[in-house]
Amino acid sequence: MEIAMAPHETTWDALRRLIDAGDVPGTVAAVAAFDDAARRLVARELPDHIQVARDDARKAEAARRAGRTSSRHEPAALSTFFQELWHYNRPSHLQAPGHDDLSPRPQGVWLGDSSPLFQEPRQDDAPRHLQGTGPGAPSPRFLEPWEDEDDFDFETDADQGWIEPMRLAGAGVLSPAAAVAWINRRDFDRWDLNGFPVIADHRPLLDVIAARPPEWQADVAVRLALRVRPRRRGGRSGRDRDGDRNLALALALLRATGAAPPDHDPLVVGYVSRDARPGSLRTDPLLPHLLPRLFTAQGVGRALRDQQHGPLSWLTALRTLAHDGVVSRDLLLDGCRRRFLLGGDAHDLRFFARLHESLSPTEAEVEGAAIAYLRILPTAPGPIAELAMRHLRRLTTLGPADIAEGFEGLLFRGETGLVSAALAWLAAVLRDSPQLADALAPALTLTFGHRSRSVQEKAVRLAVRHARHFTPLGAATLSEAAGPLDDDLHNRLVAVFGGEPVEEQPRTPAATQPAFVPRKLPVPPSPAPAEAPPRTARHLAGLFLQDGWRAGERALAAFVRLAAEDRDGLRAALAPLVEPLYGRRWRTQREWMVALATELTAPGTAARPLPFDQRVSPMDRFIIRRHAEILAALEAGALPPLLLATPTVSTGHLDPAELVARLSELEAAGATPLPADFEQALLRLPRHVDPTVAARAAALRSPHGRRAAHWLAARSHDGPSAHGAVRSPAPAAGAHGSGEPLRDPDVRVAWSGADDGLGSRVWMTVTVTAHPAGLPLADEMLAAPPPHVNVVTDGHLGAFLGWWPSVLPSHREVVAAHLVPHQPLGYGDGVLPSSMLGELAGAGGPAGAAFAVLLAHRVMPVPWLGADPAEAFLALRRLAATGDLPAAEFGAELARRVLREEVPLRAVVDLLEAEAANGAHEAMWHAVVAALPSLLPAPGDRPTSAQTGLVTLAVTLARCTGARGAIPAVTALAARPGTSRIIRQAQALQNLLSPTP
């Protein structure tokens, strides 16, 4: 197809028109028809046109939005929006002197449910997804109750239409290396409303590339394949199932060109991370190249470790292809064995073990690879070694040397269960082939030094039982190796095989054996001083749009201060940061900061936010109010000279002396603090205040100063009250509220599992019962229950989750309660990063059930969440070191997770034992006590080894901590008839907790 050109128009001019118009089909057709001269011309012009195209598109989109906004709203309403917001945001009894032009509003309206910024949905909003369904109406678009049509403006890509044609043009005219770099330019990144990358359809790129010579196409295919990067578990790119934007295009090009895929592990990982359909794999030209690499590429095992058999599973697909003869069984089985020999974590080898077993290798196949199975025994993880041993036991043709090698590879290992199974195999060999006794004697002696006495007992019992089969040479081998055995076992062995007996020392009963010695927990570091806000406009500009509450608080403080001291300099410094705001439901810190910069540099031009409804998380509502009141005061010309709530400590706390100094400065200036800022400052006070600071605060004379003085006086006593907050006699009731500090609210967490009606289930229900503190905004925040967050639609209208610990730094349990509904989320703005547990661990106040729930789910996260447990373990140890860990609640939640089959009991026991050894033994004892009643075997049930391990751990911890006091469930277990190990351990625990006089 010839490109249509106007008179006196060059090839580049015509192509530029297509790019600016966002015409993808036209660009594909035009570029495919270029000759070499046209390609060279376009290649010279393209780079300089990127910024031009971006600017033109943004201007056009801004004009479109401005026209739509002006037609939707009355001009008078827009001009008075922030004037109304300012009135709503200041109760009449706190009106500042000098602002009489702002007429009073009814007392008690605090940006609450009746304010223009936060309101309940209108009655006619609820069935919006059903509107427009009448005859002749356009197809409806489903809107959640908390959404607005404008929320989808960001996804229209109206200002990004030039990107794909630009990418196509470069791919069609550049050299292979330059084309690959061009396709991956960051200028062409596109993002959806939640900040996830938008992956473009690669078919137009394939059409453009197909017009180039075959060798050029193959070169590009290989280069793109080498650009594939590993998928980051839990990262924001987790929504992209391919893990890399180059993967789909690279695979399609490799298939189309027939080029051999490069030896690149991430390419293999990406290939197997896609659904496996046997029908497609049968004809896939890449399968013969990539299937052998599946067993050697790093990351394949991790990517497939959670796969089970299913219609889209690689396990099922490979088994089906092997059964049909499309794929060689020998290739798959040999690949699994080679992967076992390469070693690695048991979890990363799980897929290969499942594949190996799903193929059900025959005895002949095992016999042909017997040497490989023997080599697996000494070094592979326990489950893999057990798999190899199980198949070797089937063979009847192993020679004596091979059998001896196998037992030597197994019996030196430290796993009690694996060695016990090997001893059972050894007993069967000696029973069937007694002539091999001498050859196997050296392997048997390896168990004499095993750390488990039960293994030593089994080994000695086996040797004595088969003593008649050993010659004097074999007997000497056994007796000479008896040294590591316990005295009684040593003498039992030498009595049969000869040797010198030893004097037996009386063995210490199990219930009074010396306890293990745990390590000492490190002392948690003291909170560091917060970094001061920038003092100049130039430094503020570099900080202004940074994410995170620490940067945000510093930026807000510097903005307000510099707006009073150097507004012209601030305006000049922030002008380059102004950018269009897409949508009118401002959720993010960046959007609010851009709005502040816009209002400062061009007053009255910033778009006005739409009202939020009550589905906004309560703590996000409080934070958004702080930003909104600064914006409203800026527009009304009523900004105070400073903010009160800027933290002085890295935990979010505010030094009481600094608060008094700031209030004094405001009084001297005749200014009134902003309402949400004032309440936030009080919420950031520490739980104890120096009495001398409280005395200085008594000199404050403004209404806000007197209220702050009451709070400081109430927190200046030396001891905490029964509610956890320091108390003093409350002042007389009046216009300023009780003046009483916030008490610790009552927090309750319960498992739900109910259907939420939106495609997922309610995970936990959380209730927070708080006593009113006389702070309207804070009381509203605490009165609202933590809302359920839908894991499918991400029903959370805020992106300030990281700020929450700084809102209530002296009440971490309340913050944890609001974070609990976010625990199961794997993507979106509502994702709970594990680092938040570290923030809460460094905060103040008691930790209870809500914190325990978060901790119990983050130290053992579900695989699909991609959460790093390291931060959770650090938080656990920090709280254990300070004595603040809610250990009983933590243990109870771990037990509930076991009962819900979310985690295995053996893993829980290992975790508790490891943390006890790390120094948290006191806390882990309380966790075990809380977990025991629900995890012990019921009468008549056969106990598992994990249940026995839990009781054994309880014995160890009780002895270590010197605990006393009977546990009814343990008492009942100890009273059951029988001599099983769990009953003996329960009896030992009972004797420790309730010693007989």
Image (cartoon, rainbow, N blue to C red):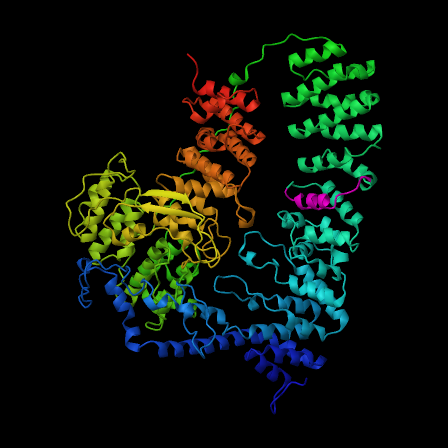
What residue appears at the point 52 percent right and 72 percent down from the top-left corner? 160
What residue appears at the point 51 percent right and 53 percent down from the top-left corner? 826
Point out the stretch of residues depicted in magenta: 347-363
Looking at the image, residue 830 sits to the left or right of residue 305; the answer is left
What residue appears at the point 45 percent right and 32 percent down from the top-left corner? 927
Can residue 766 be seen in the rendering of this structure? yes
Is the N terminus in the top left, top right, bottom left or bottom right quadrant?
A: bottom right
Is the C terminus in the top left, top right, bottom left or bottom right quadrant?
A: top left
Q: Say whether residue 355 is magenta.
A: yes
Q: Where 239 sits versus 925, above or below? A: below
**Which of the 4 quarters of the picture holds residue 212?**
bottom right
**Which of the 4 quarters of the picture holds residue 442?**
top right
Can residue 578 be seen in the rendering of this structure? no
Q: How many marks?
A: 0
Q: Position of residue 906 (x, y in %)?
A: 56, 34
Q: Position of residue 796 (x, y in %)?
A: 42, 57
Depth check, front residue: 149 or 936? 936
What residue appears at the point 82 percent right and 32 percent down from the top-left corner? 396
Looking at the image, residue 779 sits to the left or right of residue 138; the answer is left
Q: Position of residue 635 (x, y in %)?
A: 29, 68
Q: Say whether residue 379 is magenta.
A: no
Depth check, front residue: 34 or 300? 300
Q: Position of residue 23 (x, y in %)?
A: 58, 79
**Which of the 4 quarters of the picture holds residue 397?**
top right
Q: Where 758 sits versus 603, above or below? A: above
Looking at the image, residue 993 sits to the left or right of residue 347; the answer is left
Q: Residue extending furthest front?
A: 940
